[in-house]
Amino acid sequence: MAAISFQSVCKTFSNARGTFTALDQVSFDIESGEFFGLLGPNGAGKTTTLRLALGLTQPDNGTISLLDFAVPAHAREARARVGVVPQLDNLDPDFTLRENLLVYGRYFGIARDTLEKRIPDLLEYAGLAQRGDARIQALSGGMKRRLTLARALINDPDLLFLDEPTTGLDPQARHVIWERLSQLTLRGKTLLLITHFMEEAERLCHRLAIMDHGRIIAVGT
């Protein structure tokens, strides 16, 4: 069963300079339990693909399915079963690590007592078990990325979107993130990795699609 399906999806944007084609007849399927990568240079259309999959952008043509929900018509229902690691950390600096996870979990309507039981395991997964009461400002860049990853798992999602999850990290921090992501595949999660790092895609992905200028150039292992 396909966790994500794009069929002949097109998207154009208009500005003062004219019309720009962001996606041009993009088609691909991601199977449940697969670690799939979108590899391509900046401006290839990867982030637009992510926004379309989440129902945050309306396609001009084509069909999109996310966890058996038609998108964007039923994007809200689909997003309840999805976790997202964005390009930039958007953690709340006014909260502790534990409070960041708690508040984010409440957005999904998860009961507080359920979250209180889930948060210690997520902090342990992120390697931050001893820092639950620390403020965000006390964390290194790698720690923030690990917390953002843990936050994306607060609703125990079936599918995880990873938008350039290791950009700006040093090699050691990058390898820690890779190790955490590999653990998720063993738990049966479906992952979509958006990256321009060839080594990262080769290291992590079961299959990948190479994108450039809004087109899928190749799909394979």
Image: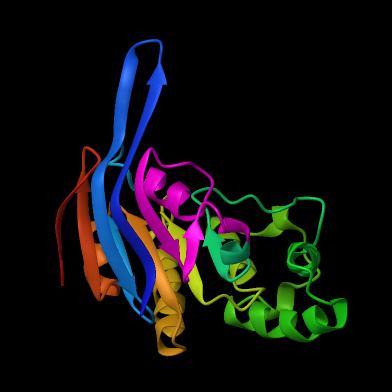
* Residue 4 vertical placement versus 20 (above, below): below
Specify the quadrant that holds the C terminus: bottom left
User: Where is residue 33, by image quadrant?
Assistant: bottom left
Is residue 70 inside the magenta stretch?
Answer: yes
Residue at 21% x, 37% y: name it. 213
On the rendered structure, is 218 left or right of 50?
left
In this rendering, position of residue 45 left or right of residue 94: left
The outermost residue toward the top is 16
Q: Is any part of residue 204 visible from this angle?
A: yes
Residue 60 in the magenta stretch? The answer is: yes
Q: Residue at x 57, y 75 (%)?
A: 157
Tell how many labels.
0
Horizontally, residue 84 falls left or right of residue 214, namely: right
Q: Nearer the viewer, residue 189 or 91?
A: 189
Tell me the colour scheme of the image.
rainbow
Q: Which residues make up the magenta segment?
A: 47-76
| Relative vertical location of residue 13 with respect to residue 202 in this rendering, above or below | above
Residue 16, compared with residue 124, is above or below; it is above
Write down the quadrant of residue 174 in the picture. Answer: bottom left
Q: Position of residue 114 (x, y in %)?
A: 80, 83
Q: Position of residue 82 (x, y in %)?
A: 55, 67
